[in-house]
Image: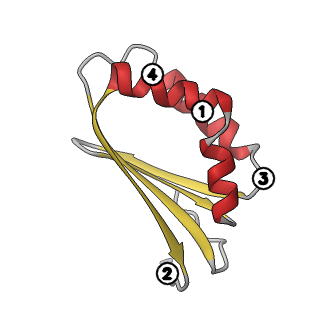
Amino acid sequence: MIVDHLKPPYFAVIFSTIVEDNLEGYLETAERMEELAKMQKGYLGIESARNEIGITVSYWQTEEDIIAWKNNVEHTEARNLGREKWYKKYQLRICKVEREYGFTN
């Protein structure tokens, strides 16, 4: 689903990943992180796609909200598991969205 109800300015966290072959527990953890993120102050939405490279974009009201999410204990534990077990590589980017537009047919 494409998130299309946002009003700039807001922030986007772009999380790009390449995963290992053994993903035991990965999907359950990813689903839990999405549930948990939805409960965080400032959370606005999420979009995700996966082929050889996975890309997840989460949207937040402020940079402070992003930092609070980063420091969430359960999220920190999941991040550590990702580094230990699931990710060959990941890259995280934080952007301020000042303008957007879209199209629906």
Q: Position of residue 98 (x, y in %)?
A: 55, 84
Please state which of residues 104 and 96 is positioned toward the viewer in this rendering: 96
Lower position in the chain sequence, tag 1 or tag 3: 3
Q: Position of residue 10 (x, y in %)?
A: 62, 72
Q: Residues within 10 Å of mark 3 (few under 14, many from 20)?
A: some
Q: Secondary structure at mark 2?
A: loop
Marks 2 and 3 sit apart, C-alpha to C-alpha, by 26 Å
Tell me the quarter of the picture where residue 39 sits. Answer: top right
What residue lies at 69% left-to-right and 36% top-to-bottom? 36
Residue marked by disc 2: 102
- The kind of residue on which mark 4 rests is Leu
Residue marked by disc 4: 81
Answer with left or right where residue 50 lies relative to residue 103.
left
Lower position in the chain sequence, tag 4 or tag 2: 4
What residue lies at 49% left-to-right and 81% top-to-bottom? 102
Find out whether the residues at labels 1 and 2 contact each other: C-beta distance under 8 Å: no
